[in-house]
Amino acid sequence: GESVGLHLPTLSVQEGDNSIINCAYSNSASDYFIWYKQESGKGPQFIIDIRSNMDKRQGQRVTVLLNKTVKHLSLQIAATQPGDSAVYFCAEKRGGSARQLTFGSGTQLTVLP
Amino acid sequence: AAGVIQSPRHLIKEKRETATLKCYPIPRHDTVYWYQQGPGQDPQFLISFYEKMQSDKGSIPDRFSAQQFSDYHSELNMSSLELGDSALYFCASSPRDRDRQYFGPGTRLTVT
């Protein structure tokens, strides 16, 4: 399953399928990007991050792709499991001395049995 | 592994009251960030501290103030609470030379 567009709030996938969550960022000067998973009532949990001098980074079952030309970020989750159900946020750190993160709108991922 | 600790986890206050939220960063993390997350919204940056000095400021109301202490823990002080202040408040920490931020479990503030 794949989310498209800027603000698709939900994505449903079958257990075992691959998931793709998309994110558009706003600032071409941003130099760092990060994905978080947030379960209901809990704090954002780090998944994977990538610097602007890279276009792909892989983790365990997750891959982040960065396309600076169109200011687009995606998170791919392989073999999606029920425990992956959560809201996923992308965030960017704008270049320069400021280090705070600017979050995008989250995507609710639901894994269907 | 040690994580960010926040207290209290839940807080109920009435309008016009004050509240103090505490954050204990991961050991050896010297930078602390505060974020506010309203219902169904993404986290919004409020303020950050490095080595006990304010480093960046976001959309923090004038009614709120924060500080970082010598042991690197931080406190967010909120006065004249309004209904709209009801939200989850997260603290995150990182080492000074790293961008990856680790979030705490949050404090759920309810203003009635």
Image: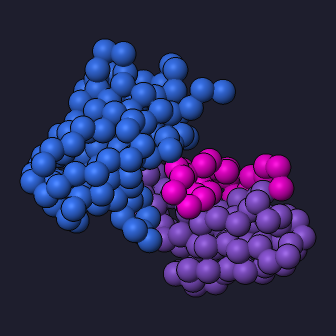
Q: Can see residue A60?
A: yes
Q: Residue furthest top?
A: B70
Quadrant of the rendered image containing residue A110: bottom right
Question: Is residue A38 highlighted in magenta?
Answer: yes
Q: Is residue B35 left or right of residue A73?
A: left
Image spot of residue A53 (x, y percent): 62, 50
Q: Is residue B11 above or below residue A75?
A: above
- Write down the region rendered in magenta: A32-61
Q: Is residue A99 above or below residue B93?
A: below
**Colour treatment of the image:** by chain
Q: Which chain is blue?
A: B
Q: Is residue B43 above or below residue B104?
A: below
User: For the image shown, how many numbered marks are present on the structure?
Assistant: 0
Residue drawn at point x = 77 percent, y = 73 percent: A111
Residue drawn at point x = 50 percent, y = 33 percent: B4
Image spot of residue B91 (x, y percent): 41, 41
Residue drawn at point x = 24 percent, y = 38 percent: B20
Q: Is residue A63 left or right of residue B17?
A: right
Image spot of residue B65 (x, y percent): 17, 40
Quadrant of the rendered image containing residue B110: bottom left
Residue drawn at point x = 61 percent, y = 73 percent: A108
The quarter in which the C terminus of chain A is drawn is bottom right
The quarter in which the N terminus of chain A is drawn is bottom right
Q: Colour of chain A?
A: purple
Q: Is residue A76 above or below residue A100?
A: below
Question: Is residue A71 highlighted in magenta?
Answer: no
Q: Can see residue B35?
A: no
A45 or B18: nearer the viewer: B18
